[in-house]
Amino acid sequence: MGSRTAAIMMGTRSWRSVLVAFLLLGAFPSIAGGPLHAQCRVEWTFGISCYTVYLQLVSQIKEWKTADNCANGGEKCLYTLKSANEHYIVAKHTTPVHKYVDDLTFKLTSSLDKKSCYVSGFSVSELWYAVFDHGTNYCNLHNLIEGSGLDKVSGYTESTNNFKCTQYSSANCTIY
């Protein structure tokens, strides 16, 4: 076998190894230490009605629609409300510097007595090849909760981790 043929064979083996590793990590995301695409899922409980949570989240999204709030840094700006009702909110967030776009959803479920609201939030990068995001997808969601004051209501809890949320443990929401 000539040296050129050997080099081609070696290159093919290397690509096969990379492909196998990628497929294995895709099949077993816990091996990779979290999602393989920049995204975040967060669960919250609020000791208030879902209607109130809905009003506060929608109001905050609308308040942060322009770049004005990011003049001094951070990314508490450029949110766009796509659709909303008391049960489901869809929005987008655009990063102010690089203009990356993330899709956000909030699913709101009332407790049986309607005195508490359970919310599942999800943020995912539209950029298909995004893997790491420095916690941006977490901050997309967290900033809205904090900005609207929902983190201060009675019965507030938040649950997520690095397996549900890209780079959650290193997120710095004063920057992102």
Image (cartoon, rainbow, N blue to C red):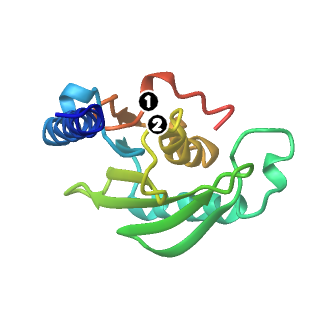
> Considering the numbered disc 2 on the image, is that residue within a helix, a strand or a loop?
loop
Q: Give the mark nearer the N terminus: 1 vs 2.
A: 2
Q: Which mark is residue 75?
A: none
Q: Quadrant of the N terminus?
A: top left
Residue 66, x across and y down, in percent: 77, 62
Up-down relation of residue 103 to residue 118 (above or below) = below
Residue in the foreground of this view, choosing between 50 and 175: 175
> Amino acid under label 2?
Phe
Q: Going 41% across and 50% down the picture, which residue do you hit?
A: 48
Residue 24 picture location, percent across and down: 14, 36
Q: Position of residue 159 (x, y in %)?
A: 33, 33
Q: Farthest residue in the top direction?
A: 170
- When the figure is inspected, residue 81 is found, relative to residue 166, above or below; the finding is below
Amino acid on which the number 1 mark rests in the picture:
Gln
Q: Give whichever of 16, 58 is nearer the camera.
A: 16
Answer with left or right where residue 4 lies relative to residue 71: left
Q: How many marks?
A: 2
The answer to which image quadrant residue 10 occupies is top left
Residue appearing at x 23%, y 33% in the figure? 6
Q: Which mark is residue 167?
A: 1
Dot 2 crowding, Cα within 10 Å, few <14, some 14–19, many 20+ = some
The residue where tag 2 is placed is: 132
Q: Position of residue 16 (x, y in %)?
A: 19, 39
Relative to 30, 140 lies left or right: right
SS class, disc 1: loop
The answer, for residue 55, to whether it is visible in the render is no
- Mark 1: few, some, or many residues within 10 Å (few <14, many ≥20)? many
What residue is shown at x 57% (from left), y 49% (from top)? 144
Query: Vertically, is 114 above or below 69?
Result: below
**Side of 103 where 17 appears, left or right:** left
Quadrant holding the C terminus: top right
